[in-house]
Image (tube, helix red, strand yellow):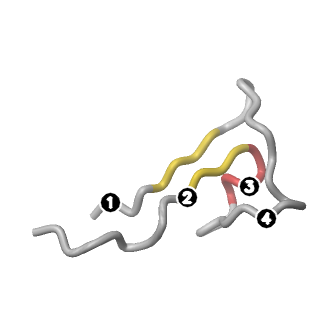
Amino acid sequence: LFKGLSFPTISSVGPNAAIIHYSPEEKTCAEMDPDSIYLVDSGAQ
């Protein structure tokens, strides 16, 4: 039974992908690079 998201979707790239529950900010966000790790965490249960 779906009750809701556990947290908003996290989308991060490069070093930001190592930050737990990363949230983009203008000075810390990074452009996507095909050679970098990309993380998408949708909070699936």
How dense is the environment of label 2, judged by Cα within 10 Å: few (below 14), some, or many (20 and up)? some
> What residue is shown with label 4?
25
Provide the secondary structure element on which disc 2 rests: strand
Provide the secondary structure element on which disc 4 rests: loop
Disc number for residue 5? none
Find the distance from the CA under tag 2 to the CA under tag 1.
12 Å
Q: Which one is earlier in the sequence, the residue at label 1 or at label 3? A: 3
Count of picture labels: 4
Find the distance from the CA under tag 3 to the CA under tag 2.
10 Å
Residue 41, image x, y percentages? 48, 55
Q: Please name whichever residue, 38 or 28, is drawn nearer the observer in this view of the structure.
A: 28
Q: Do the residues labelled 4 and 3 touch (CB within 8 Å)?
A: no
Q: Which one is earlier in the sequence, the residue at label 3 or at label 2? A: 2
How dense is the environment of label 3, judged by Cα within 10 Å: few (below 14), some, or many (20 and up)? some
Q: Are marks 1 and 4 in contact (CB under 8 Å)?
A: no
How dense is the environment of label 4, judged by Cα within 10 Å: few (below 14), some, or many (20 and up)? few
Identify the residue shown where x is 74% and y is 55%: 16
Identify the residue shown where x is 27% and y is 72%: 4
Identify the residue shown where x is 76% and y is 30%: 33
Identify the residue shown where x is 77% and y is 51%: 15
Q: Which one is earlier in the sequence, the residue at label 1 or at label 4? A: 4
Residue 36, image x, y percentages? 73, 34
Find the distance from the CA under tag 1 to the CA under tag 4.
24 Å
Residue type marked 4: Glu
> What residue is shown with label 2?
10
Q: Which one is earlier in the sequence, the residue at label 2 or at label 1? A: 2
Find the distance from the CA under tag 1 to the CA under tag 3.
20 Å
Disc number for residue 16? 3
> What residue is shown with label 1?
44
**Drawn side of residue 40 relative to residue 12, left or right:** left
Q: Which one is earlier in the sequence, the residue at label 4 or at label 2? A: 2
